Image (cartoon, helix red, strand yellow):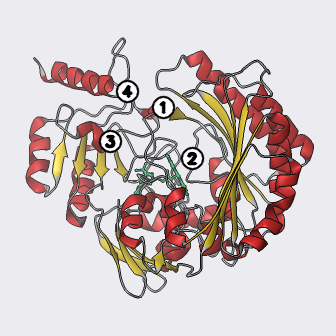
C-alpha cells in the first residue's frame, strides 16, 4: 500500500469510528502531508504518547463530544505528560506546518478542540490538590468529577459546572457557571494563577502580579486562545455549615410553561444571591391532548437559607401554575451538591445559542417561545428542542466584579436563555436544518429584549458577530493581549480571537 493509500485508509477508519460515512471519503483540502520519519522523531522527543489513527486510544484523544464535528479528524494526537511535551508539540507542529488544537475534555460546543493537524490532549494532567487554606491546584484537564471528588465533605468548594466529564480548565477559561456561581461566583473569579505554555514554548506563571494582561485574558477570554494552561491555582469558596434547601418542581403543558417562565423571570430580577434556580422546558412526544399538552417543565435549584425564607420566594411560582410534583429537602450542603451533577451523555449533536437577559422578558415574547416549542420539528427522546432559563449568571456576588475587570464581560445579567436543539448523530440533514431554523427563530424572538451577549463557553458557529457577543467591550483588549502572547496565531480556531492589526 502506498503512503497516500495507507493514509486514506487510516482517515477512512477514523471517520468510520466517528460515525461518519465512508462514501465519498476524500482528503480535506487543508491536509498537510506528513512523513513517517517526522512522526518517529516526535515520538522520540515526547514523554507522553503519540497516537495516530489505528492506535488504541486515538479516538478518545481527539473525538469532540458534539457529534457535529466528528469529521474533523486530526493526523495525530499527543497525550502530553508535562509542560515540556506541550512545548515540543508546538515546535514540532510549527516545523511541519501543521495546525494544532488543545483538548481538555472535548466538550466545546463549537468543536474547537479538534483540528485536521495535531491535537494536544491534556487528559493526563488531571491532578487536584486542596490545601487546608482552600488553595486548590488543578491540572489543566482535571474534570468537574476530579475536583468534586477532591473536595466533597470538606470545607471547600470550587464553584464549577454540572457535567462531571467537563474539564475545569476549559470551563474556567471561558468564565464557568453552575449551580454555585450565584452565591460563590464564577469559576474564573476564583483563579489565583495559571501556569501557561506560550505559543513560543516558554512556560510562564500568570497572576495579578506576574503578566497581569495574560491573567486578565485567561479569565473569560476562552481556552485555546492565549496558551496552554497546564496547571491552575484557585482560591476555593468556603461551604455553608448550615443545612440548605434543595428543590425541584415539575409541571406539564404549554400554559404551565409560560406561567413558570414568566414568574421565575420576575423572581430572578430581585432574588438574593442565595437563591439559585434554572428552568427547562422540553417538547415531548405528542399524545391524545395534542402538541401544547406535550411539554415537560421543571425548575430546580437550591437555597442557602431557611426553608421558611425559601418558601416565601417560591410561593408566587407555585401559585402561577400547580406543579405535578414537588420535591423540597433540607439537607447538609454536601448531600445537595452532588444532585447538581450529570454524568457524561452518549455522544450526540446539539446546536444551542445562548443569550443573556438583563431585564424581565415581555410575556408576549415568552409566549412566542412556548409557541415555538409547541411547533417543535422533532420530539423524540434523542432529537428534540428545549428552552432553558438559567439563573446562575447574575446576582450581587457575580456583579461585584466589573465588566472590564476580567475578560468575562457579562455582568449585570439576570439569566441566560438557551433555545437548545439536540439530535442523534447522523440525523437527516433536512431535519437538522429545521432544528437550526427553530433555534434561529427563537433567538429572533429574544433579540429585541436582550443585550446581544452570548456565553463564550457555549460557542456556536452560526453566530456571525460572535466576537462582539462573547466579549463586547473587552474585545479590543483581548486582541492586544493576543498580539503580545500569540502574534503569529498559533492558537487558532473557527472562533478564536485574532491579534490586533
Ligand atoms: C455536557 C456539557 C455540559 C456543560 N456544562 C457547563 C456548565 O455547567 N457550566 C459552564 O460554564 N459550562 C458548561 N459547559 C461548557 C464547557 O464549560 C465548555 O465546553 C468548556 O470549554 C469545556 O472544556 P473541556 O476542556 O471539557 O472541552 P474542550 O473542548 O477540550 O476545550 C474547550 C476549549 O478550551 C480549550 N482548552 C481546554 N483546556 C485548556 C487548557 N488547559 N489550556 C488552554 N486551552 C484549553 C480548548 O482548546 C477549546 O478551545 C458544558 C458543556 C457540555 C458539553
Residue that mark 4 sits on: 29
Q: Secondary structure at mark 3?
A: helix
Mark 2 vs 3, N-terminal side: 3
Task: Quadrant for the N terminus, please.
Answer: top left
Q: Earlier in the sequence, mark 2 or mark 1?
A: 1
Q: Residue furthest top?
A: 23
Residue at 40% from the left image edge and 46% from the top image edge = 106
Report helix, strand or loop for mark 2: loop
Q: Are marks 1 and 4 in contact (CB under 8 Å)?
A: no
Q: Nearer the viewer, mark 2 or mark 4?
A: 2
- Whether label 2 lies within 8 Å of ligand 1 gets the answer yes
Quick one: label 1 or label 4, which is nearer the N terminus?
A: 4
Contact between marks 2 and 1 (CB within 8 A): the answer is no
Question: Which residue matches tag 2?
Answer: 459
User: How far apart, in angstroms, are the residues tagged by discs 2 and 4?
Assistant: 24 Å
Query: Is residue 483 or residue 187 the one in the foreground?
Result: 187
Residue 208 image position (x, y, % from top left): 49, 83
| Location of mark 3 (residue) | 62
Quarter of the figure with the C terminus: bottom right
246 lies above or below 51: below
Residue where numbered disc 1 is placed: 68
Q: Tell which of 428 and 41 is nearer to you.
A: 428
Q: Answer with left or right where residue 208 lies relative to residue 287.
A: left
Name which residue lies at 82% across and 41% down. 256
Q: Residue at x 28, y 37 (%)?
A: 59
Amino acid at each position: 500500500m502506498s503512503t497516500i493509500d495507507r493514509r486514506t485508509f487510516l482517515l477512512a477508519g477514523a471517520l468510520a469510528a466517528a460515525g461518519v460515512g465512508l462514501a465519498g471519503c476524500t482528503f480535506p483540502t487543508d491536509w498537510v502531508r506528513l512523513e513517517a520519519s517526522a512522526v518517529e522523531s516526535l515520538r522520540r522527543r515526547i514523554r507522553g504518547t503519540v497516537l495516530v489513527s489505528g492506535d488504541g486510544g486515538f479516538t478518545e484523544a481527539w473525538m469532540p463530544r458534539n457529534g457535529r464535528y466528528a469529521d474533523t479528524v486530526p493526523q495525530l494526537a499527543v497525550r502530553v505528560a508535562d509542560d515540556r511535551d506541550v512545548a515540543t508539540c508546538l515546535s514540532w507542529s510549527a516545523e511541519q506546518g501543521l495546525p494544532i488544537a488543545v483538548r481538555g475534555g472535548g466538550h466545546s460546543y463549537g468543536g474547537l478542540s479538534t483540528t485536521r493537524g495535531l491535537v494536544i490532549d491534556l487528559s493526563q494532567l488531571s491532578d487536584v490538590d486542596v490545601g487546608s487554606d482552600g488553595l486548590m491546584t488543578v491540572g489543566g484537564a482535571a474534570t468537574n468529577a476530579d475536583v468534586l471528588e477532591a473536595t466533597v465533605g470538606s470545607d471547600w468548594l470550587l464553584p464549577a459546572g454540572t457535567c462531571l466529564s467537563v474539564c475545569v480548565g476549559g470551563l474556567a477559561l471561558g468564565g464557568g457557571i453552575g449551580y454555585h456561581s450565584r452565591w460563590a461566583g464564577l469559576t474564573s473569579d476564583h483563579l489565583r494563577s495559571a501556569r501557561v505554555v506560550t505559543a513560543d514554548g516558554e512556560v510562564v506563571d500568570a497572576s495579578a502580579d506576574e503578566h497581569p494582561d495574560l491573567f486578565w485574558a485567561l479569565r473569560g477570554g476562552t481556552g485555546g486562545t492565549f496558551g496552554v494552561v497546564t496547571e491552575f491555582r484557585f482560591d476555593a469558596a468556603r461551604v455553608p455549615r448550615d443545612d440548605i434547601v434543595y428543590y425541584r418542581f415539575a409541571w406539564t403543558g404549554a400554559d404551565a410553561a409560560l406561567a413558570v417562565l414568566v414568574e421565575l423571570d420576575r423572581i430572578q430580577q430581585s432574588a438574593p444571591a442565595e437563591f439559585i434556580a434554572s428552568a427547562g422546558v422540553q417538547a415531548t412526544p405528542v399524545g391524545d391532548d395534542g402538541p401544547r399538552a406535550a411539554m415537560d417543565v421543571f425548575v430546580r435549584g437550591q437555597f442557602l437559607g431557611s426553608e421558611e425564607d425559601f418558601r416565601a420566594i417560591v410561593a408566587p411560582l407555585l401559585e402561577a401554575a400547580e406543579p405535578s410534583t414537588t420535591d423540597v429537602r433540607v439537607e447538609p450542603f454536601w448531600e445537595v451538591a452532588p444532585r447538581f451533577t450529570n454524568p457524561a451523555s452518549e455522544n450526540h449533536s446539539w446546536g444551542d445559542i445562548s443569550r443573556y437577559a438583563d431585564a424581565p422578558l415581555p410575556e408576549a415574547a415568552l409566549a412566542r417561545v412556548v409557541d415555538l416549542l409547541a411547533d417543535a420539528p422533532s420530539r423524540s427522546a434523542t432529537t428534540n428542542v428545549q428552552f432553558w432559563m438559567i439563573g446562575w449568571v447574575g446576582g450581587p456576588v457575580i456583579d461585584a466584579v466589573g465588566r472590564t475587570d476580567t475578560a468575562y464581560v457579562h455582568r449585570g445579567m439576570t439569566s441566560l436563555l438557551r433555545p437548545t436543539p439536540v439530535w442523534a448523530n447522523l440525523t437527516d440533514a433536512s431535519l437538522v436544518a429545521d432544528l437550526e431554523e427553530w433555534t434561529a427563530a427563537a433567538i429572533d424572538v429574544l433579540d429585541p429584549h436582550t443585550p446581544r451577549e452570548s456565553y463564550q463557553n457555549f460557542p456556536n458557529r452560526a453566530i456571525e458577530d460572535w466576537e462582539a457577543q462573547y466579549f463586547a467591550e473587552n474585545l479590543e483588549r483581548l486582541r492586544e493581549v493576543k498580539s503580545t502572547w500569540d502574534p503569529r496565531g498559533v492558537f487558532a480556531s473557527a472562533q478564536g480571537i485574532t491579534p490586533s492589526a
